[in-house]
Image (cartoon, rainbow, N blue to C red):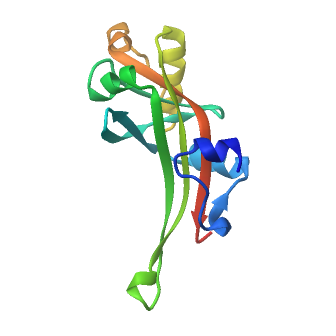
Amino acid sequence: MSQEILMHPHGEMRRDERALTDPQALDAILQAGRVMYIALASADMPFLLPVFYVWDGTALWFHSARAGSKIDIMRQNANICFAVSEYGGIIEDDLACNFEARHRTVIGVGKTYFVDDEAEKVTMLHCLMARFSDKRFHFPAANLKATQVIRIDITSMKGKQHGY
């Protein structure tokens, strides 16, 4: 068993035919997605939430207010799990229990890092806004000061697909 599989909390994939191993396929899912779910842990309590994100080909980036539950948890525990899914509809069957979702998903783990360099924050925020709008935005100093940018350095990720 590879080191990467051992490090991944989901272990080996049960259905090999659904595994996505091509880095270009994983990249395409991360480029196409808009919402990423992040899972954090504080003691024995899980904390899951959706965030808008940017994938730059090597790391994932998102932003937040500088204070709050997720920031507090990440300050205590930099480990993070993330998931991005592309939903492609339902695959129907005559049996209700055989209905399935057509989907492609990337799940991974990594470490969070707080980005405080203003130029790096502005670059990431421009990349984020470009995913939703063709407009070019100005970020006032007060807004930048109140915004925390977080980078996820990925330790391990894998993909799964069904119905494609």
| Above or below, comparing residue 143 to residue 96 in the picture | above
Q: Position of residue 102 (x, y in %)?
A: 52, 69
Q: Is residue 52 left or right of residue 110?
A: left
Q: Nearer the viewer, residue 7 or 26?
A: 7
| Above or below, comparing residue 60 to residue 5 in the picture | above
| Above or below, comparing residue 27 to residue 127 in the picture | below
Q: Position of residue 51 (x, y in %)?
A: 39, 38
| Above or below, comparing residue 138 to residue 73 in the picture | above
- Residue at the bottom extreme? 94
Q: Position of residue 52 (x, y in %)?
A: 42, 37
Q: Quadrant of residue 127?
A: top right
Q: Nearer the viewer, residue 37 or 137?
A: 37
Q: Position of residue 133 (x, y in %)?
A: 47, 36
Q: Is residue 137 left or right of residue 4?
A: left
Q: Nearer the viewer, residue 51 or 47?
A: 47
Residue at image position (52%, 33%) is: 130
Whether residue 32 appears in this view of the structure is: yes
Residue at image position (37%, 22%) is: 76
Q: Nearer the viewer, residue 99 or 136?
A: 99
Whether residue 133 appears in this view of the structure is: no
Q: Quadrant of the C terminus?
A: bottom right
